[in-house]
């Protein structure tokens, strides 16, 4: 009898072990199998949250098939206590294993809302943008000029949230004074800027920042990036250019930046100035005259007067020979590369063509014809 009992017990044990093994195998497959999400979502992990709370949220939103398997998988991979606060994008079909990695790896939030402090040539603005997880693109929710407008509720709300991301966006052609002036009003940054960086040494780009970062550290990042871009472009420059140093290339790049309305024309515009330098012609470009008046501190806000075109300043290229002594703005990578690798043309003139771009000419006769055409376009616009 005892032998029969022992045999039955062994059978039951084997069945239990088989079932347990099957459950474990099923759980492992569920943990690493493609998830049920058909569209990406944003998952927000509050500070002090738990894996249990996150798993319930994911299960309710259809991101995982089993909260139990998700929690057991987190325990097994020793990540249950490694949750990071923030908003994270979970892509369609993400496995439980991938989702756990997303919410525990740390780093900046990859989803949710961001505030962008935009430094523009004529105006600066604060934008509130929210990521659409299905397209992985940001959609603008609010925008305002902090110098003239009250902050909207959309801004004050996200400003109070711990997982909001912050970004400084600097466009091509702004001056160093404009950058510093805007950074002073970026409320997530700290510290004073005692000296405005030299003109031209800051890279126009987008820079993610954190609450409490110093303004000086942001400027240092901008300056380091510009130095790397300029060094690489100088190393790969075209032979025989009338530019003796990287600094001269930066000066020319800043002029190209201010004169180019259509990005595709950068290398053509560069060729005009290179040809003029090689022929000993004056550059005769209005943006340098404007810089001689404003010194980069704000915009002129009106047209140039004939007296200003004739007035001698170190930057007035209608009066001086060659390049001005400093850049007149902070050029982007494309303008730096255009200055050092211009198109090969015979052009020494250009004028607006009415489309936002320019009409180029190799002779004064061609140029005068282009100017006459542009004046007709201007006259027609005035009379409309």
Image (tube, rainbow, N blue to C red):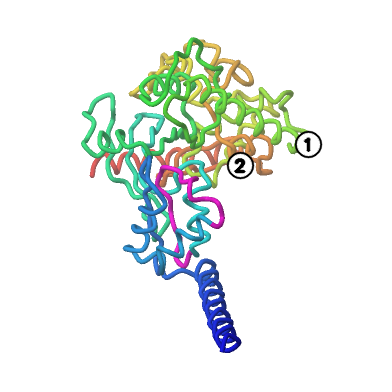
Q: Nearer the viewer, residue 303 or 100?
A: 100
**Which x, y percent locates residue 11?**
57, 85
**10 Å neighbourhood of mark 1: few (<14), some, or many (≥20)?**
few
Q: Secondary structure at mark 2?
A: helix
Residue 235, relative to residue 30: is it above or below? above
Q: Nearer the viewer, residue 35 or 31?
A: 31
**Which x, y percent locates residue 20?**
53, 74
First along the sequence among labels 1 and 2? 1
Q: Dot 2 corresponds to which residue?
A: 267
Locate residue 121: give its quadrant. top left
**Which x, y percent locates residue 320?**
59, 15
Residue 106, relative to residue 69: is it above or below? above
Q: Relative to 274, is 22 on the left or the right? A: left
**10 Å neighbourhood of mark 2: few (<14), some, or many (≥20)?**
many
Q: Dot 1 corresponds to which residue?
A: 239
Locate residue 46: give its quadrant. top left
Residue range highlighted in magenta: 76-94
Name the chief secondary structure element in magenta: loop
Residue 283, relative to residue 131: is it above or below? above
Residue 279, relative to residue 154: is it above or below? above
Rendered residue at 55%/38% (across/down): 365
| Residue at the front extreme of this rendering | 1
The image's mark for residue 99 is: none
**Which x, y percent locates residue 284?**
54, 25
Cβ–Cβ under 8 Å for marks 1 and 2: no
């Amino acid at each position: 009898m005892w032998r029969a009992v022992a045999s039955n017990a062994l059978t039951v044990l084997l069945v239990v072990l088989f079932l347990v093994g099957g459950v474990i195998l099923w759980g492992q497959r569920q943990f690493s199998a493609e998830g049920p999400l058909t569209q990406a979502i944003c998952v927000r992990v509050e500070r002090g949250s738990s894996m249990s709370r996150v798993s319930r949220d994911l299960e309710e939103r259809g991101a995982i098939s089993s909260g139990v398997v998700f929690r057991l998988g987190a325990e097994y991979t020793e990540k249950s206590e490694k949750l990071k606060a923030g908003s994270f994008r979970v892509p369609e079909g993400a496995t439980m294993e991938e989702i756990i990695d997303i919410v525990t790896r740390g780093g900046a939030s990859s989803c949710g809302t961001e505030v962008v402090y935009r430094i523009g040539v004529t105006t600066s603005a604060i934008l509130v943008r929210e990521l659409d997880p299905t397209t992985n693109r940001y959609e603008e929710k609010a925008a305002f000029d902090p110098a003239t407008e009250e902050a909207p509720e959309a801004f004050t709300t996200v400003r109070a949230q711990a997982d909001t991301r912050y970004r400084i966006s600097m466009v091509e052609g702004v001056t160093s004074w404009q950058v510093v002036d805007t950074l002073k009003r970026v409320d997530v940054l700290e510290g004073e800027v005692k000296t405005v960086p030299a003109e031209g040494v800051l890279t126009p780009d987008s820079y993610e920042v954190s609450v409490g970062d110093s303004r000086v550290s942001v400027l240092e990042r901008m300056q380091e990036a510009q130095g790397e871009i300029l060094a690489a472009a100088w190393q790969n420059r075209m032979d025989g250019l009338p530019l003796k140093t990287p600094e001269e290339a930066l000066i020319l790049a800043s002029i190209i930046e201010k004169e180019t309305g259509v990005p595709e024309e950068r290398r053509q515009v560069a060729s005009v100035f290179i040809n003029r330098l090689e022929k000993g012609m004056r550059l005769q470009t209005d943006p340098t005259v404007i810089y001689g008046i404003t010194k980069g501190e704000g915009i002129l806000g009106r047209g140039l007067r004939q007296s200003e075109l004739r007035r001698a300043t170190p930057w007035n290229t209608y009066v001086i020979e060659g390049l001005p002594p400093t850049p007149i703005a902070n050029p982007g990578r494309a303008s730096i590369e255009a200055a050092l690798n211009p198109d090969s043309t015979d052009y020494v003139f250009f004028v607006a063509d009415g489309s936002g771009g320019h009409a180029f000419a190799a002779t004064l006769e061609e140029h005068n014809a282009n100017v006459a055409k542009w004046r007709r376009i201007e006259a027609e616009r005035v009379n409309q």
